């Protein structure tokens, strides 16, 4: 086990300021709507919705907001449909980038994503131009409680079907194949562990070192994607200095 998490650094995290938190709530609201439409409004019968609710609570989204989003998405008058569209491209220095979006206007989102790539020294690519450099992994983030034994948690996770384990001072990061994600999450929940998030992430098969100028451009690009309401997740294969300090 390492003192920091390789899983925690593969995806840009949000919520650094009040303005950023409002932006996060908008993004999570869309995820809630998609989850409700795909599996219904009852989290007990909809694992995807249950995961998004956990994510919302971890981001300190008020429960009233969560319930309002679920109610709105399940109402007959809800006519906004979000499409999940994934874009691939290259950041400055040839860094591979995957951008996952939920949008109600494909033309707007495509133009915005292309603009951000261009503005930051990169380029929007074609489908599958970089996805082969990444592997889909189910990643469960668990709150580390006082008294937790790292080895016991690791063995519990492995028994549930996990294939890798890492930790930080406050969290455990447990990975599994996407097909085993539900079993791992449910097993940890039944064991009384608090799930912070559970989702399928894109993990780079290898990372690349970048110089300071390239890193500045990559960070600017990530910040611009963070500020775009349509963008849900961004994955890249660059080694960025002090990533853990930013989580």
Image (cartoon, grey):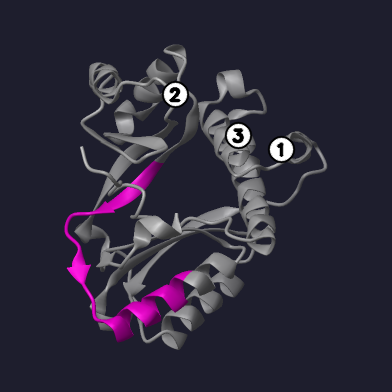
Q: Earlier in the sequence, mark 1 or mark 2?
A: 1
Q: Label for residue 146? A: 2
* Residue farthest toward the right in the current orientation of the protein: 77
- Nearer to me, 36 or 237: 237
Asked if the residues shown at circle 1 and circle 3 are in contact, with their CB atoms under 8 angstroms apart, the answer is yes
Q: Label for residue 172? A: none
Give the CA separation, mark 2 to mark 3: 24 Å
Mark 3 nearby-residue class (10 Å; few <14, some 14–19, many ≥20):
many
Mark 1 nearby-residue class (10 Å; few <14, some 14–19, many ≥20):
some
- Nearer to me, 154 or 164: 154
Mark 2 nearby-residue class (10 Å; few <14, some 14–19, many ≥20):
few
Residue sitting at x 61%, y 47%: 28
Residue sitting at x 56%, y 54%: 83
Q: Which residue is mark 1?
A: 66
Asked if the residues shown at circle 2 and circle 3 are in contact, with their CB atoms under 8 angstroms apart, the answer is no
Q: Label for residue 53? A: 3
Q: Position of residue 8 (x, y in %)?
A: 36, 49
């Amino acid at each position: 086990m390492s003192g920091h998490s390789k899983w925690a650094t593969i995806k840009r995290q949000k919520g650094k300021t009040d303005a950023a938190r409002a932006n996060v709530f908008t993004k999570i609201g869309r995820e809630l709507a998609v989850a409700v439409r795909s599996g219904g409004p009852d989290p007990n019968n909809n694992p995807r919705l249950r995961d998004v609710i956990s994510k919302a609570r971890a981001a300190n989204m008020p429960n009233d907001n969560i319930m309002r989003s679920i109610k709105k998405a399940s109402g007959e008058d809800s006519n906004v449909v979000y499409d999940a569209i994934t874009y691939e491209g290259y950041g400055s220095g040839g860094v591979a980038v995957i951008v996952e979006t939920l949008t109600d206007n494909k033309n707007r989102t495509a133009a915005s994503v292309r603009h951000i790539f261009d503005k930051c020294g990169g380029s929007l690519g074609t489908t599958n131009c970089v996805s082969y450099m990444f592997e889909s992994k189910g990643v469960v983030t668990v709150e580390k409680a006082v008294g937790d034994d790292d080895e016991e948690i690791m063995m519990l996770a492995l028994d549930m079907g996990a294939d890798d384990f890492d930790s930080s001072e406050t969290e455990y990061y447990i990975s599994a194949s996407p097909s085993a994600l539900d079993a791992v999450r449910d097993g940890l929940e039944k064991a009384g562990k608090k799930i912070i998030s559970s989702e399928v992430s894109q993990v780079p098969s290898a990372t690349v070192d970048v110089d300071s100028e390239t890193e500045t451009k990559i960070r600017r690009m990530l910040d611009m994607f963070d500020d775009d309401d349509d963008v849900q997740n961004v994955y890249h294969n660059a080694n960025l200095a002090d990533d853990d300090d930013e989580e």
